Each structure stands twice: as structure tokens, then as C-alpha cells.
Image: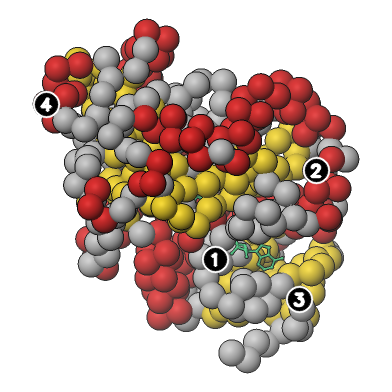
Amino acid sequence: MKTDLMFDYVVLGGGIVGVSTALSLITKHPDKRILLVEKEESFAQHQTGHNSGVIHAGVYYEPGSLKAKFCREGLTETIKFCLLHKIPYQQCGKLLVATNDTELKRMKELYERCKSNDIEVEILNEKTLNEIEPNISGIGALLVKSTGIVNYKLITKKMLEQFESLGGMFLLNTKIINLKEDEDKIQIITSNETFSSRYLVCCAGLMADRIAKLLKIKINFQIVPFRGEYFKLPEKHNNLVKHLIYPIPDPTLPFLGVHLTKMIDGSITVGPNAVLGFKREGYSQFNFSLKDTLQLLSFKGFHKVLMRNFKSGLYEMKNSIFKRGYLKEVQKYSPSVKLNDLQPYPAGIRAQAVLDDGTLVHDFLFAESRRSIHVCNAPSPAATSAIPIGKYITDKATEAYNKLT
Ligand SMILES: Cc1cc2nc3c(=O)[nH]c(=O)nc-3n(C[C@H](O)[C@H](O)[C@H](O)COP(=O)(O)OP(=O)(O)OC[C@H]3O[C@@H](n4cnc5c(N)ncnc54)[C@H](O)[C@@H]3O)c2cc1C
């Protein structure tokens, strides 16, 4: 594609959040020049292409939070998008299984949270759970029927086709390496060429903090990469469960625990765990980046996270190295899964924003300069929520653009 020098809006990042935002922008402003820039050779190569593929219903999220709102809207919008574009999805429902008294208590709290978030939910006792899922054992469960599964890469691809058909432009293999905000524009310096835009939207995932810093935006967080390692069950187990099977999560941790996920291709994955990553965009177990690791070690927020979560961190690390520990997590609710059932499957890496004081940011987080908006924290369920997030950013960007020009 040949780019002219000035755009109205440039969107950085070809994950589902960036592509959804680009589509929303061009839909609202068909007369504007809008460019999407991605550093990889194709779209959805990072978090969007390495996730569980769950369309979340919004069970866990703090009532009134952006996550609770966007997840609920996102479920409806995602299914609407799939129906419109004939993308396969399935609302198979999800079970959150309690295996001891502590979990049973937490399960009841989660039931109340579902009610506050207006999510249809049923409580199952041991007998009913066993009737609907004979291969799952627990002393109780929550059933959320609206939870679904999909391939987010396919959704991103379709969104991109729509964006292009409405006149949007995109560049692949183009890394944004510097940004300069002037009175009347933002200069965008890339690995290939330099251009300008009236307004910039950054959806950089694992690089969100670094991109915000290029514009000297004062931020009080850093991205900490948490690897999510998966296994895949052998094909003979494809009918092991009818629902997605989740443990009852520990409310002090931001991750959901190792679950059994039915994938849209019919297979079942196990995972993800949550271990510290030593390379932001490195997917194999022993990937290491000196730059990423030094930045992590020099971040005071990370030291605080480490101190607060030392025990659980070590436990996760141990289970990452020794498959037997990982297996124990699964066998808590699915005793028929055996060690040799855990077959290799690609890992994902979560971009988790951590504040300087060591708080793990739970909600979606944004930062702005005069001519830019940055998605600073978009962990799960941001794939589910990508359509409402895109519309939210579009409204913010449009308001800022109109004030400036
Ligand atoms: C293990 C795991 C499981 C998950 N499971 C689910 C789930 O089941 N359901 C759900 O709703 N969510 C899930 N999520 C969360 C979801 O996948 C992410 O929240 C979502 O994909 C974030 O999309 P994104 O566009 O913000 O980021 P990304 O997909 O990471 O995209 C960011 C893009 O920015 C590009 N970029 C960065 N820097 C530059 C630069 N300088 N120049 C140009 N381009 C750049 C990157 O190359 C990348 O393509 C999961 C995430 C993980 C990691």
C-alpha cells in the first residue's frame, strides 16, 4: 500500500482491540483517512492469537467496572458479529466447580456477583453436577449457560476485511519506533517510513507502557508479562465434557485458574496457568530477553508483587516445570485426565499492568495525551469485549479530534 503523509486517525496494533477500534472509527467516519499499523507480518499474532477462545459472560467482574459493562455488551456484540459474518461459535455454557468447603463459600459469593452483574446463573449440587458432567467431580457448581467459544483470529480477520472494504488502509511489517506530538499533529516514525496523523490510538498489548512513554505520558504502571501455558487433550477425550469447566478462582489473584476449555475446532485444551514471563513476546518456555528482564527487575512495583505473591508464584513456577503438579490442578475436578493426556499446545502471554505500588490492575485502563489515547490494560475478557472497547475509544477519539481541529 502507498501511504500519503497525513492521516486523520492512525491506530497502532493489529490485535483484536486495535482492529475493532479501526473498524469502529471507519464506520463512524467513512470520509476520514484511517490507517492501521502492525509490526508483525500478519494480524492477531500476540494475545489475540494465543488465548482460550472463550466468549465470557462476565461472572467475576466488580459490578460497575468497565470490565463488567464491556463484557456483558461484548458477549451480545460478539455473537451478533459471528451471526452476521457466518463465523462459527457455540454457546456451550460454563461450569465453575467447587471441590472443597472454602471453594463452596467462594462459589456462593460468585453467585451473588453474577446476580449483581445481571447474569443468569444456576447453583448445582453434587448430584446434578454429576448427572450433567459424569467425568467431573465436585461438591457443587455454578452453571452459566450464556458463556461461549469462538476463534478470535477469525473475528479479527473478518473485522479487518470490513475495515478495508470501508476504505481503511493498513500496513504490516511496520513497527512504530518513535512518536512526536506537535501542536497540530502526531509524527509517527516507523521502521519503514514516517507519516503524521491528527490523532493516534494505541492498542499495543504487551508494549502498551513503552508506547505511552514515547509520548512522555506520565504513567504509574508497567506491563508485566504472565505466561499462560496450555496442554491439549488427545482426540479420544474430545467428548470428555459438554461445558467449559473452571475452578472457583482465588479472589486475590487476577487469573482464573487452570480450566478445561472446549475449543471451536472440537478439541479440548487444559490451562492456562500463570507464570512470570522473561520475554514479553516470547512463546517458548525458555525464551529470555535481557531488555525485558532488566526492565522487570528494575521496576519497584514488580518487587512488591513478588513479595505479596511469593508463595503462589513459586507454586505456579513449580507446576510449570513439573507436569505432575499441573496435572493435580486438573485432577481436582477431572480425575480421569492422566499425565500422558497432557499434550503440548502453544502458550499465550498476558499483558498485565502493575501499578508502581504493586497493585495488579484488574479493570481496563486508558491513558491520554492531547492527540492520543492508549489502551494500557486490556487483559481477559478484552477479546470478548473488543467491540464495545472499540466503540468507547471511537467516542473518546472523536471528541478529542473535534476539539482539536
Ligand atoms: C493465555 C490467554 C488467555 C486468554 N483467554 C481469553 C478468553 O478466553 N477470552 C477473552 O475474552 N480474552 C482472553 N484473553 C485476553 C485477550 O486475548 C486479550 O485481552 C486481547 O487479545 C487483547 O487484544 P489486544 O489487541 O489489546 O492485544 P494483542 O492481541 O496483544 O495485540 C497488540 C498488537 O500490537 C502490536 N504492536 C505492539 N507494539 C507495536 C509497535 N511498536 N508497532 C506496531 N505494532 C505494535 C503487536 O504486534 C500486537 O499485534 C486471554 C489472553 C491470554 C494471554
| Rendered residue at 55%/30% (across/down) | 254
Q: Is mark 2 within 8 Å of ligand 1?
A: no
Residue 215, visible in the rendered structure: no
Per the rendering, the mark at residue 131 is: 4
The residue lying toward the viewer, choosing from 213 and 207, is: 207
Among the two numbered marks 1 and 3 on one chain, the one whose residue lies closer to the N terminus: 1
Per the rendering, the mark at residue 190 is: 3
Residue type at tag 3? Thr
Q: Nearer the viewer, mark 2 or mark 4?
A: 4
Among the two numbered marks 2 and 4 on one chain, the one whose residue lies closer to the N terminus: 4
The residue lying toward the viewer, choosing from 320 and 86, is: 320
Among the two numbered marks 1 and 2 on one chain, the one whose residue lies closer to the N terminus: 1
Residue 11, visible in the rendered structure: yes
Residue type at tag 2? Leu
Q: Is mark 3 within 8 Å of ligand 1?
A: yes
Q: Nearer the viewer, mark 1 or mark 3?
A: 1
Residue type at tag 4? Glu
Q: Nearer the viewer, mark 2 or mark 3?
A: 2
| Rendered residue at 22%/42% (across/down) | 240
Quarter holding the N terminus is: bottom right
Residue type at tag 1? Gln
Outermost left residue: 131
Measure the alpha-carbon separation of dots 2 and 4.
47 Å
Per the rendering, the mark at residue 45 is: 1
